Image (cartoon, grey):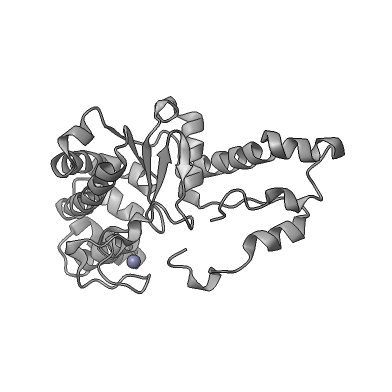
Amino acid sequence: MPTMHDWNRFPTRTRLAGRWAAPVWMDNRVNLSALGERRVNPVAAASQQTIYLGGGEEIGAAVVVDGRIYRGARGLAGEIAHVPVPEASDAVCRCGNSGCLDAVAGRAALVRDARLLAEIGQSRALSSVLARTGTIRPVDVTEAADAGDPAAQALFRRSAQLFGSSLATLVNVFNPDLVILGGGMARASAHLLDTIRETIHRRALPAATEGLRIEPSAVDMEIAGVIGAVQFAVDEIFSPERLSAWLDDRTPVGRPDLAGTTRPAA
Ligand SMILES: [Zn+2]
């Protein structure tokens, strides 16, 4: 958890297992949303190599390899928010570093830049929102762009170019057959999708983008995350080796040890 330093090394899983006397597995919301998306979206289910980009408070990517989440050695695979981008060289990121994608194209950056446009009168729609409500939310930027506000549309275009460049790197590294934009990225896909597609096709290797599909998610990321969490827990608890360990007791309750360490916790 790069931006949740206070939680690093906190024994979340042990504490929850102790509280509920049950096995507990943990993963991050983007990985779980990617699992949920595979469950309900036939296009995702048919893909073996998927990059799922989740927008929200912080951007993250899930990497699905041969139908399984690739988590990396410490569960940090897909932390695209903190890849360095040249355009962010002097932008300080909340992770403490500078130059991260999140610092120039994440939700907080979008709101920060939109507020600036509103304050200096560059966007009539956003100036009006700020005068009326005293704040700018991501949905205000989407609505301003929907209404044809050129400054809001330009903000999304810039974000989409930055995301597209970073995604092009992932496309070269993992060679997926599908890239899914989830969360806020899906909600703003009308303003992001074409530019992200164009940037990926321009920046990634032609052979890597041949046949590559780039699509908004079919289901809301929060819903997909819940579906994915349920599926994750069910898959773990009913895996053949664990099932044989608790079936005689007829319940896994009281057996927090079943979680073991066979899968890396987030
Ligand atoms: Zn960062």
Residue 147 location (% of width, % of height): 23, 45
Q: How many marks?
A: 0
Query: Could you tell me which residue is drawn at 29 percent across and 48 percent down?
Result: 143
Of residues 4 and 151, which is closer to you in this image?
Answer: 4
Residue 22 visible? The answer is no
Residue 171 location (% of width, % of height): 27, 42
Residue 47 visible? The answer is yes
Query: Could you tell me which residue is drawn at 23 percent across and 56 percent down?
Result: 125
Of residues 181 and 184, which is closer to you in this image?
Answer: 181
Q: Where 146 falls versus 108 (above or below)?
A: above
Q: Where 86 falls versus 153 (above or below)?
A: below
Residue 226 location (% of width, % of height): 56, 43
Query: Could you tell me which residue is drawn at 45 percent across and 52 percent down?
Result: 72
Is residue 85 toward the left or the right of residue 1 in the image?
left
Q: Residue furthest right?
A: 249
Is residue 13 toward the left or the right of residue 177 in the image?
right
